[in-house]
Image: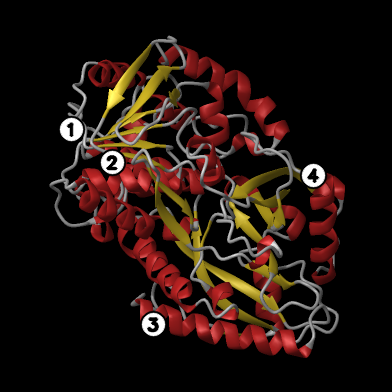
Amino acid sequence: MSTSSSAALSPERRAKELKELAAMSADELDMIVIGAGITGVGVALDAVTRGLKVALIDKYDIAFGTSRWSSKLAHGGLRYLAKLELGIAHTSAVERGILLEENAPHLAHKLAQVMPLGKDTNIIQKIAARIGFIGGDLLRITAGTSSKTLPRSSYANKEKTIKLCPTVAKDGLKGSWVNWDGQMVDDARIVTAIARTAAENGAYVINHADVSEVTGNSVKVTDEFTGESFTLGAKSVVSATGVWAGHIDKDIKLRPARGTHLVFKSEALGNPTGSLTVALPGSISRYLFVMPEQLGRCYLGLTDEETKGGIVDVPPTPEEDIDWLLENFNRALDRKLTRDDVIGAFTGYRPLIDSGEGGSTADLSRRHAIIESDTGLFSIVGGKFTEYRLMAEETVDKVVKDRGLTAGPCVTKHTPFIGAPKHAKSKDVSDAELAKLPESLVDRFGYEAPNVVAACTIERPLEQVAGMDITRAEIAYAVTHEGVMTVSDVLDRRTRIGLVESDREKALPIVEEIVNELVK
């Protein structure tokens, strides 16, 4: 185990742990996990809580890749019912319930999905939506998720529908079907919380370190900042690199799909509290939706197009995606969105397994697979964000069995993340303490929020950054506790300031000042 037992990922801890890893014997580690996205941090947490000695290493940063480009939803599997993929639908609902009720109730909550009964959909789509929502209720029940966590679906009249989604088209509106699904405060925050919880349990968590010369029992690690390299051995190596899995194991074939979201000021959509959900013309299984988000924003998504050409680290957003999203979503709005309303955009890759059957990527299965190469490298590919915990459990199960490792049973179903109400360190934090802090701070840190302020060593901790509901203390905490090494780590992952270029420009001088002061 790491000699550090705190959940604090600081620059000093990173330097210390790199030295410890460089000095290790070839088989001292049980597992090396490559990639600190949602799957990689999940594998690391699962393994370390079974008593294995684990190192989690990422070339760039925690949540650098696909894991920060999702819709920020903890899906219950509704779309898979329409495709009769009942297994994925059920496991998605189960994993959603675990995230909402056990692991991270401070970072994930219920969200109303509002399907308007208006002129933009035909009678078949309206009936299909109601049947689907009833199916969603059954999924929630069979998954064992409380109706207090996710209420049952229902009909909302016209007035209630408009209250949830003020800019919905009102001509011919009869009301709406309302379903409840899970929404994360932010996907990258979930990934960071899991990485820190793994670190708290003894995992080595190293970002900004390139991994090369990968085999089934060793990798070459190169520190991005010092350029120093060393060979790190282990009893097993797991690649959790998503769409980049084929770069490490050439036999893995993926068909990455492009998913694009647009960013708007919440006021452009009337400050909705529900997610306006719109069926694509002629479809009963594909929808567009606009979701209320943190920082006074809304996200509209999403596309599902096959990615042509090479995979890049930060995917650009094609102009045609913007046009397509606006055209297809505006059908359901009174006040049409224009290009001038778009204040940002983000695009990510879905790491879909190539089944060799051709067809649209929208029709490809979201199943995951664990593949062992000729060199003994394990790769976990495919899957979806909500199912990360199950994917990690199955991966560690296979590695433990195939490598003959001594490990306990999986305990992550009941492992609360740092900041969760059931976490050991949360019991000493009172609701009265939380009530004294900015609501947005509590939303992003839960019961850890008082420590964000208490641990701050810079001046004016509760002063807002560039007029946004992000405090200076959060920026400092990102450095001292959340693994930040660069300004981009703060702007693009620990916070989502960077999704809007004008916000980035305003915040940049403040973030640079704090990061430069604290990163030694």
Whether the residues at callouts 1 and 2 have beta carbons within 8 Å, the answer is no
Q: Earlier in the sequence, mark 4 or mark 2?
A: 2
Q: Earlier in the sequence, mark 3 or mark 1?
A: 1
Q: Local crowd at mark 3 within 10 Å, few (<14), some, or many (≥20)?
A: some
Q: Position of residue 255 (x, y in %)?
A: 63, 52
* Horizontal arrangement in the rendering, residue 186 relative to residue 172 (left or right): left
Residue at which label 1 appears: 1
Q: How far apart, in angstroms, are the residues tagged by discs 3 and 2? A: 31 Å
**Residue 463 visible:** yes
Kind of residue indicated by mark 4: Pro
Whether the residues at callouts 3 and 2 have beta carbons within 8 Å, the answer is no
Residue at which label 4 appears: 318
Kind of residue indicated by mark 1: Met
Q: In percent of the image, x 18 and y 32: which residue is there?
A: 1
Q: Earlier in the sequence, mark 3 or mark 2?
A: 3
Compared to residue 304, the image places residue 161 above or below, namely below
Q: In percent of the image, x 51 and y 28: which residue is there?
A: 489
Q: How far apart, in angstroms, are the residues tagged by discs 4 and 1? A: 45 Å
Compared to residue 161, the image places residue 250 above or below, namely above
Residue at which label 2 appears: 198
Identify the disc placed on residue 141: 3
Q: How far apart, in angstroms, are the residues tagged by discs 1 and 2? A: 11 Å
Compared to residue 346, the image places residue 62 above or below, namely above
Residue sitting nearer the eye, 125 or 84:
84
Q: Local crowd at mark 4 within 10 Å, few (<14), some, or many (≥20)?
A: few
